[in-house]
């Protein structure tokens, strides 16, 4: 196997070109700094490195665009007629990678939201890199990422909601067989879709009771803030902007900020409306407990056809499944578990990780129940708030 470090070439910052993948940098003190690795996407990226005092970079030839014409170092060349057997990742390793990806997403959003609040324009390139990683995770084996993203904290709602909306948009778009380039734009728009809320008073944003009419008007104003933020953001596609600005629109024209009606609301805008509501319903908030996916689906269907696209809602339910990976279910023998694996299975026969008995009110030794072969079935989906115990340690 070729180590990525074997393919590094030392290149002065003055000789960088678009498409090169920078893994490390050297500053004025001649020390190597591990920076956020990534591909040079514009001349502005190079200018920024120069401005920050970078003299030399270490470029990964294997991960750079072939058009750069970088030579692969001899010690990084694969030996002829050899094959490498790559061991598949275990579920624990997949969970660790997913946890790392979600942590990376939260860190980026925290940084960008803070900088945006200070009046700085959003840089799109870090979101493009993150979206690429999310696509890779979703299209590889999404079960581990779904379980990790099911762990929610009401104190980190804005961050986790944005990440989950991006993840669900990729998942839904893939289900609809949309092009990968479109899915990437979905992800970026999803990550940024609530950026305008940084200007909403925390007392309103986190109010545990119903908003007054005046407070609701202020809350709706987050989309006006988002419009201004989008105007200052260069390099953001129209689809990403639409996802950000259309997720509160309604088919009957009563939504905001534009009051779009019927055909004025494009396909991807309709998708973002469905996903934003679904994720908000299935999350724990300061003023409400999380709903089960099944309960959230019922509300989505009630909002059709005047607010939400009915055909798309049914397609979304088929995509997610009545018992999505990461959701809690009760089996017919009163055991409670987490839907652990569903890829390649029908909706009613996932693998369930059981850890608790509702009948006897105590924890059980963890067992993985394959509903394709077991003599039990799923009785119902349940919400975390309906349990007397915290399920989060079992994810």
Image: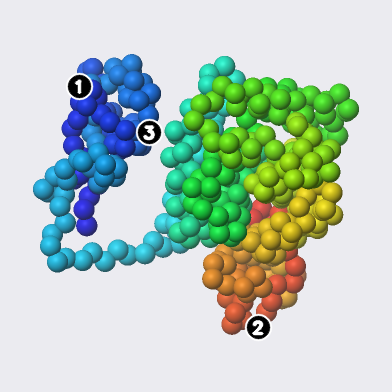
Give whichever of 135, 17 is nearer the camera: 17
Q: Picture quarter containing residue 366?
A: bottom right
Residue displayed at 19% across by 30% down: 11
Residue displayed at 43% across by 40% down: 129
Give whichever of 65, 118 is nearer the camera: 65
Which quadrant, please, contains the C terminus? bottom right
Can the viewer see residue 191? no
Q: Is residue 61 above or below residue 177?
A: above
Seen as rendered, the residue at the extreme front is: 263
Seen as rendered, the residue at the extreme right is: 213
Can the viewer see residue 218? yes
Instruction: Identify the residue under disc 2.
Output: 375
Q: CA distance from mark 1 to mark 2?
A: 66 Å
Q: CA distance from mark 3 to mark 1?
A: 25 Å
Mark 2 is surrounded, within 10 Å at the Cα level, by few (under 14), some (14 to 19) or many (20 or more) other residues, namely few
3 or 1: tag closer to the N-terminus = 1
Give whichever of 133, 14 is nearer the camera: 14
Instruction: Identify the residue under disc 3.
Output: 41
Q: Position of residue 265 (x, y in %)?
A: 72, 43
Instruction: Identify the residue under disc 1.
Output: 30
Q: Position of residue 196 (x, y in %)?
A: 66, 27
Label 2 sits on a secondary structure element that is: loop
């Amino acid at each position: 196997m070729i180590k990525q470090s074997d393919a590094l070439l030392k290149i002065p910052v003055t000789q960088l070109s678009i498409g090169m993948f920078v893994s490390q940098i050297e500053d004025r003190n001649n020390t190597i700094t591990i920076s956020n690795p990534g591909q040079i996407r514009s001349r502005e990226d190079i200018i920024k490195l120069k401005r920050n005092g970078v003299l030399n970079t270490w470029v990964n030839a294997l991960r750079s665009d072939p058009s750069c014409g970088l030579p692969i170092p001899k010690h990084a060349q694969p030996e002829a007629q050899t094959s490498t057997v790559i061991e598949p990742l275990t579920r624990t390793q997949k969970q660790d990678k997913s946890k790392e990806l979600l942590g990376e997403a939260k860190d980026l959003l925290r940084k960008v939201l803070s900088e945006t609040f200070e009046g700085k324009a959003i840089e799109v390139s870090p979101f493009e890199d993150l979206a690429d990683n999310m696509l890779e995770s979703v299209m590889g084996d999404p079960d581990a990422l779904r379980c990790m993203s099911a762990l929610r904290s009401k104190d980190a709602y804005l961050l986790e909601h944005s990440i989950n909306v991006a993840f669900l948009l990729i998942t839904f778009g893939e289900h609809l067989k949309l092009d990968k380039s479109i899915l990437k734009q979905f992800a970026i728009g999803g990550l940024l879709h609530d950026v305008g809320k940084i200007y909403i008073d925390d007392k309103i944003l986190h109010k545990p009771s119903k908003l007054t009419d005046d407070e609701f008007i202020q809350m709706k104003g987050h989309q006006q803030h988002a419009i201004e933020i989008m105007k200052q953001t260069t390099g953001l596609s129209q689809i990403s902007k639409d996802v950000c600005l259309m997720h509160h629109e309604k088919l009957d024209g009563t939504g905001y900020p534009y009051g779009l009606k019927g055909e004025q609301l494009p396909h991807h805008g309709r998708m973002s409306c469905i996903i934003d509501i679904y994720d908000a319903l299935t999350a724990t908030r300061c003023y409400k407990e999380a709903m089960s996916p099944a309960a959230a689906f019922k509300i989505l269907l009630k909002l059709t056809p005047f607010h939400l696209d009915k055909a798309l809602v049914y397609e979304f339910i088929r995509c997610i499944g009545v018992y999505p990976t990461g959701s809690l279910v009760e089996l017919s023998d009163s055991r409670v578990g987490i839907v652990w694996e569903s890829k390649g299975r029908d909706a009613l026969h996932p693998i369930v990780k059981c850890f608790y008995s509702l009948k006897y009110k105590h924890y059980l030794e963890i067992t993985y129940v394959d509903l394709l072969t077991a003599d039990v079935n799923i009785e119902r989906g349940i919400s975390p708030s309906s349990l007397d115990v915290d399920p989060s340690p079992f994810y």
